[in-house]
Every structure is written in C-alpha cells, then in structure tokens.
Image (spheres, rainbow, N blue to C red):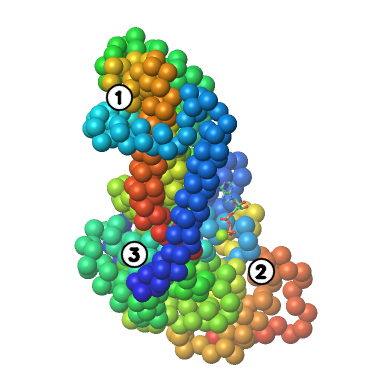
Amino acid sequence: MIGVVRTWLRGLPAYLWGGWGAIASLLLLLAGWEFASQWLDPLALPDPRTVLATLHGLLTDGNAWSELAITGRRALSGFALSLGIGSALGMLAGLSMTASMMARPWVTVLVGTPPIGWLVLAMLWFGASDGTPMFTVFVACFPPIFIGAMQGVRTLDGQLREMAQAFALPPLQRLFDLYLPHVLSYLFPAWITALGVSWKVVVMAELLATADGVGAALAVTRSQLDTAGSLAWIVAVVGALLAVEYLLLEPVKREVERWRTLA
Amino acid sequence: MAHAGVNTAALELAGVGHAYGARTVLSGIDLHLPAGRIHALVGPSGCGKTTLLHLVAGLLPLQDGTIRNGFARSACMFQQPRLLPWKSALDNIALGLKARGVPRAARHAQARDQARRFGLDDTALAQYPQQLSGGMQSRVALARALVLAPDLLLLDEAFSALDVGLKAELYRQLLAEQARRPMGVLMITHDLMEAVRLAHAVWVMAPAPGRIATGFRFDDAPAQRTDAQVYARTAGLLEDATVRASFGLDAPAPAAPLALAAVGGLRC
Ligand SMILES: Nc1ncnc2c1ncn2[C@@H]1O[C@H](COP(=O)(O)OP(=O)(O)O)[C@@H](O)[C@H]1O
Ligand SMILES: [Mg+2]
C-alpha cells in the first residue's frame, strides 16, 4: 500500500508538469489567434477576447447551457449506445477467428461511408427528431470501438488463457479477471477517440437536421454572419469535450490502468 | 474425454498417444502415479512432455488411450509464472480459490498464509507481478498452485528458468509442502539432476514419437538426499545406454559403468 502511494506521489510532479505544458501550449494557440486577428477583418476572424465575451454573454443569459445540454444528451446517448453495443460485439467477434475475419470488411464499409451519408439516411428514417443525431453519432462511433474491442480480445496472451483454463476460472471470472482488464487497455483509447468523433458529428447533424442544440445555434449565427457567435459556440463545444475527456475519462483510465504505470 | 474418477487416489495413464495433425508426438504412454509420490518425466526438448501434461490437466482433448485421474483436486505450475499483470501478488495467489467460490476475506487469509510460508511479506503481496523479481514471481506462481491444497500437482519445467540458488529454495519449499501435506506430484523437466533430486521415480522419455524409454526408482525421502548423492545418481543415470540414447548423447560411456544400485537407484 505504502509502495503504491509512494509511486503515485513520485509520478505526480510529472503529471502536473504535463498539465502545465498542455495549458501553456493552449495559451500559445490563443496568442497566435489574437495575433492573426489583428491583421484580419473582424468579420473573418474576431479577436479571442470578443469571442470569449460573446461566450460569456451566451452562458450568463442562460441560453447556452440548455443548448449544450441538448447537444450533450444526443452526443452522449449515441456514444453510450456505441460504447455498449460496439464493445460487446467487438469482443464477441474477437473470440472467433471466423467472426473477426468476417467482421473486418463490414467495418471497412462503415468507416468508408461518410458521416454525411449516414446523416441523410438518418434524416429520411428519423426526420427532425433526436433519433437523427443519435443514430449518426452511433454509426460514426461504432467502428473504432468495435475494432478496439476485437483487437483487445485477439491479442490476449494465449498462455494466460491456458492458465485460466487450468485453474478452472468460471466464465464470469474469466470475463472480469482476464478479458476485461486486458481489453480495457485497447478500449479506453478507442472510447476517447469515439467521444471526440461523437461531439463533431452531433454538431454537424444538428446543423442540418434539428431546430435546437448547438448545431442549430451555429446555423443561426452563420445565417446572421455572426463570426464571433459561431466561434463562441465552437469554443463551448471544444471546452465541453476537453472537460469530459480530462476530468472524467483520463482519471478513470489512470485508475483502471494503475498496474501498467507501476511496471 | 476419459477423465473418469476411480476409487484409489492415483493417476493412471494407459496407452496414451497424441498427434498434432499428421504428426505423432506421443505414443503408448503408460504411467501410474500413486498418492503422495513425486514422479519426474525427463526427456529432451520437443519430445512431447508438455503435451502429455496438458492431456493430464485436461487442457487438450484426449485422442488415444485412457487417463484415469482419481485425484479430487489438481493444480498446475508452468514454466513461466503466467501471473495476471493487473492483479496484485495476493490476488494472483488467491485466483484459484476465487474460481472455487471462496469468499474474499477467506481466500485472502489462505493466500496470505501460503505466501508467508514462502517468504512473501505484505509489501510483496501488495505489489503487481511486474514489480517483483523473477524469483518472487515464481514463488507467487507456486503459492497460487499450492494454496488450492491439491492432491495432484502438475509441474511443467516450473524451475528451469531460475538460477541455482532460487531453484534450491523452491525445491526446499516444495518438499516442505509435500511433508506437510502429501500430494502426488507429476513434474516435467529436461534437467536430469532436478529429477534425481526431487523424485521417487524418474521416467526417461525418448523423442519421435515421444514414449517412455526407461524408468528408475529411488526409495529414500527426497528431502534427505545430499548433494553428493544427487551427483552420484545423476552420473549413474547418464551412464545408462538408454538414457544416453534418449538425450541424443553419443555411445555409452567406455569405462566400467557406475553401479546405480550402489547409490540407491533401481531400474523399474
Ligand atoms: N499446438 C501444437 N501444434 C502443433 N505442434 C505442436 C503443438 N504443440 C507442440 N507441438 C509440437 O509437438 C512436439 C512436442 O512438443 P512439447 O509437448 O511442447 O514438447 P516438450 O515439452 O517436451 O519440449 C514438438 O515438436 C512441438 O513442435
Ligand atoms: Mg515443454
């Protein structure tokens, strides 16, 4: 126990330093934006302070939160569907050589079909309901999660599998003590990738298909040639994504993969 | 599969054979391992020892012959520790108990007991396998098998990757466990001296296809054997023509052969 705490403490400065590095490089990006905005027409690229002020206004008058909540609900439910179904099917496919060979071309077709194609189909099937963005997000998130899960199962050490058989691990224990911990190391990066995809795709779907959500708000700012408003919404979406990834997924990943970092 | 139970606790193999595809790697293996005895199978690499052990452990379907395993509980230790990297040493030791449905507190207590006998302290038990030295990992793997209180222990080259000091220590721990709670042990090794040190009977396998070429009995208690005895017996075995042929050594030793019987060995 003491050893674990000591190792964690030793790793902490590096983690914080890594965080400062990320913040510093974001600030550098902001500086570059500010610099560029001095040379460009404010209609083309308003300076960051104007955009942040616009965002602040959107957030304080309360509208932005409800739009973000609607978008977040759609993105996360599509993502969650993909996470559940994609992880389960991917793991099942990984268990069988035949299934994984058969699944590959299907996944290639899924990856190759542009999201906008799925969106058009979804609009035909689900109309202007929540179903359209959710379905589009689901389809776009599915391939990386499915492939991650399948590869996780396929790469499991055969010797450990044999050991599990020799010690007569029952199926549930085999799942939780053998397959999941190994597969999670493949699944987590896939989930994070898919989460990013879900935010991008949901905004695109809303822009074209729904009357509310951040995407719809972007459509309005675009029609009013309100560049500062558009950028404010974009900053809000990116900020929400970063928050979910670094405040939720990263800490969970660190906890689940503690054994890996202690090697 | 013919893993039928019999009343007398013994492991009985009759005419066991195995082929991978068209390649026969084992043929006509007969073996009788009574309770509480240590039997060693020695043979050159690739002669089918691991295959035979997998058949006994039920990890491979039986193709030919019969295996009657009268022991209620068996446990395995492999050449590599094969520990789960995402579990602490304690949880690794308790793995088989968990598979049997032993509640968490009870299995941890048993695992801790077993680990103490093997010189693993609480600090080591809290660590992940990759934080432990190779020797510690092997001890964890042996503890994981022995904590199940098996009456049949299957060892597949379990000690061959260790240095002499660690080997000696694990031999001691295995024999101490055997004295505490007798169990049948079937150990596989390519190390003749290891077999002579630990086993009541040594079966020598010849390759292509794997079969038992000859066997020797040593009736004294393994824990009592001195280094000198072990060397003399190993030398004696190495002068046997059948043993030399099995390992692909050239022509039998020229000089007057050392009488194996004089150092306590009997041909089976
Ligand atoms: N799964 C397998 N498929 C095909 N051939 C195998 C397989 N496992 C082992 N063999 C072959 O069978 C022979 C015996 O292998 P093994 O039982 O591992 O021998 P040993 O343990 O004595 O070194 C070897 O020649 C090996 O190449
Ligand atoms: Mg082998």
Residue in view at x 38 percent, y 27 percent = A229
Q: Nearer the viewer, mark 1 or mark 2?
A: 1
The label nearer to you, 1 versus 3, is: 1
Q: Quadrant of the N terminus of chain A?
A: bottom left
Determine which quarter of the picture holds residue A126. top left
Q: Which residue is mark 2?
A: B242
Q: Is the shortest distance between ligand 2 and the CB of mark 3 under 8 Å?
A: no
Provide residue A165's location: percent of width, then percent of height. 39, 52
Q: Pick the residue in front: B39 or A131.
A: A131
Which residue shows up at 28% across the image and 14% down it?
Answer: A128
Ligand 2 found in image quarter: bottom right
Where is mark 3, residue-wise? Answer: B91
Circle 1: residue type: Gly
Residue drawn at point x = 23 percent, y = 32 percent: A62
For disc 2, the neighbor class at 10 Å (few under 14, some 14 to 19, many from 20) is some
Tell me the CA gap for discs 1 and 3: 48 Å
Q: Which residue is mark 1?
A: A213
Chain of the residue on which disc 3 is drawn: B
Q: Earlier in the sequence, mark 3 or mark 2?
A: 3
Instruction: Look at 53% across and 25% down and name the residue there.
Output: A41
| Observer-nearest of A105 and A31 | A31
Q: Are marks 1 and 3 on the same chain?
A: no
Element carrying mark 3: helix
- Look at the numbered disc 2 and give the secondary structure of its residue: helix
Q: Are marks 1 and 3 in contact (CB under 8 Å)?
A: no
Q: Nearer the viewer, residue B207 or A221?
A: A221
Q: Please name the amino acid that badge 3 sits on.
A: Asp
Q: Please, which chain is the residue tagged with disc 1 on?
A: A
Q: Position of residue A224 (x, y in %)?
A: 38, 16
